[in-house]
Image: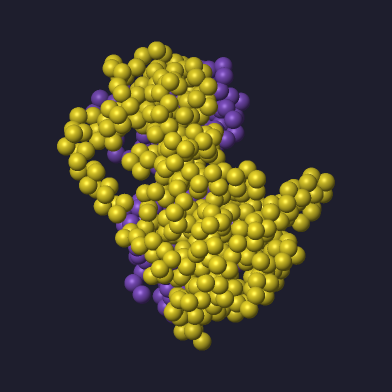
Chain colours: A yellow, B purple
Amino acid sequence: MNDKVQEKLSILADAAKYDVSCSSSGGKRKNENKGLGNAEGMGICHSYTEDGRCVSLLKILLTNYCIFDCAYCVTRRSNDIKRAAFTVDEVVNLTINFYRRNYIEGLFLSSGIFKDSDYTMERLVRIAKKLRQEHKFNGYIHLKTIPGASEDLIKEAGLYADRLSVNIELPSELSLQALAPEKNYGQILKPMGAISRELVHNKEEKKLFKLAPNFAPAGQSTQLIVGASAENDKQILHLSNQLYQDYKLKRVYYSGYIPVSNDNRLPVLATPPIIRENRIYQADWLLRFYGFGVNELVNDFFPNLDLEIDPKLAWALRNRHFFPVEINAADYELILRVPGIGVKSAKKIVSARRFTPLTFEHLQKIGVVLKRAKYFITCSGRSLEQKDYTEEVIRRKIIFGENSYRSALVKQQLDLFQQVG
Amino acid sequence: MLIYLYDGTFEGLLTVIFEIYERKAAPAQIVCRKAELPGLFTQTIPVITDEAKADRVWIGLGKKISAAARSQLYKAFLSEQPQTAMLIYQYAQLTFASAVSIEDNFAADCVRELAQINKQVFRESHRMEAFIRFQKTADDLFYATIVPDFNVLPLISEHFRKRYADQRWLIYDTARHYGLYYDLEKVSQINLDKEIADRSGNLPANILEEQEHLYQKLWQTYFHHVNIPERKNRKLHLRHMPLRYWKYLTEKQPQ
């Protein structure tokens, strides 16, 4: 019996690991029933895998039997792998016992589609319900919405889950048709729309009745695969931007495609596009926390993000007319746009300059990365750089250091070719 | 060279600050009595902790800075770093000399350095909330040992009380020789005469609950199977989970 659970866990954790979402924050579930768990605070990463990703939730599939045949997915019907399925009680027991030992913040449950969508979704909901009602579990629960599941089931799921997600996976209808023949955009966007309407509705209800039941208090998220299909960064980021605006998504996750199959519908990649994934995440952050418009980062002239430098520096180099920014006078919004100054430093600058005019020494102590920032700022009219460099020189100086950039140039490029593959 | 000596408690430090103002004699250093004394040509002033005096300083600070900023001083103190005593005094001095709150004045060294120490203390307490691993004993006690870099037990007590309201637990700091025990009603501080766990925090097998080993193995299985070998990044792994914490992590024990 125990060996069986071990084996199931190894198969169904393996199958779930390509879903990158691991967030456990944003839930507002307090432990008010003297039950188990509390999800009111910030998220906690309890461990980290050897690839450096956080482990916050028990992330598993209920089963990896699936009637769909999506090329990018390891559990697709035509793939010859071991299959397994948990029972409802097995998932509940694992969650409770892991949580009690402080291994995890909660459960992230997804599933292959067996029989049909509603049948599968109904089981996911049953597990969440059992945890909440029978075990008074107040930890974090993230449920994946099965494509094609009925709206009633999704509504019920939201009563027990802290977060719901529908994965888009492929950034355009065209690649979806090619790689996931059983899916279509309408089928994906429909539940997403339903969840977002329900979230708005619930918010209004809460205004009227404080005790109205919660609906997915940590909102909804989705995932896009980067590099499995031909879309450029402009298409990907415009889609994300639309999802944040129209569907009020909490997060869009990006997953650099890892070759999980030799399906001939897919590109051959030597290594996963990790640098590109990272640049897209940086751009996503700029959209959500730095007040950048998506067109400022990627547009028809610059359809792809620069792999060598981060998107904020790339923007600053393209828009030198905004600079230099005077640290002791400029608005917070403008200071936030300086490369090398993050949200925390920008806030500290705006607070501290009320007491005294700030110098470069202050900035360095506050945590500003002067190596990048110095080309774009003045402190009380002073600049650290006497000369007016061209875009290209600044770029090289930042990447390769002050002096030795010529020899480093060659080395770095070789490295990059290897990394990008 | 005027050196004030205190007993190592936070109230003791606040009493020192009171005495400094009372005597109008600025300190060269504020040192815990247990610490080694520096130099020959020094004059030491031993200060006896006085709750009334400590309270007056604490309340005085509360009138000038926000509650959050004030509690940051206590948190920084828990870092046990020798320089924090002086920094807290300098912070108090700056506070009392200014008409407005100085808590956002990051151009002042003591404000910024205390903020940095606070960040370290916060990070350590957050790590403990993440890396503590309970082992269940036969009498249903969930037991964990820790050796945090700073004295963070007081800071994580609430977190675990709220989270594990329906199970008895004990978290023991084996470096500072005290622990927190929750009995389903309240959390209290306890000292053990003899520590039960071995150096890596493992309890003897005979006092564990019978399924404990099974769940430890399941967790190890899970941990190894969520890893994506194609993305291996040991540097990042170590940055998030420094080696010194591994001895307490169930998933990092040999199988």
Q: Quadrant of residue A279?
A: top left
Q: Identify whether B71 is placed above or below A45.
A: above
Q: Identify whether B48 is placed above or below B92.
A: below
Residue A339, horizontal then vertical, whole percent? 40, 31
Q: What residue appears at the point 37 percent right and 49 percent down from the top-left corner? A: A275
| A238 horizontally vs B224: left or right | right
Q: Identify whether A129 is placed above or below B125.
A: below
Residue that extends furthest to the bottom in the rendered view of this protein: A1
Residue B88: tell me if it is visible: no
Q: What residue appears at the point 43 percent right and 66 percent down from the top-left corner? A: A265
Residue A290, horizontal then vertical, whole percent? 52, 34
Residue A401: tell me if it is visible: yes
Residue that extends furthest to the left in the rendered view of this protein: A407
Q: Nearer the viewer, residue A114 or A46?
A: A114
Q: Identify whether A220 is placed above or below B91.
A: below
For the C terminus of chain A, the quadrant is bottom left
Q: Nearer the viewer, residue A344 or A116?
A: A116
Q: What residue appears at the point 54 percent right and 51 percent down from the top-left corner? A: A252
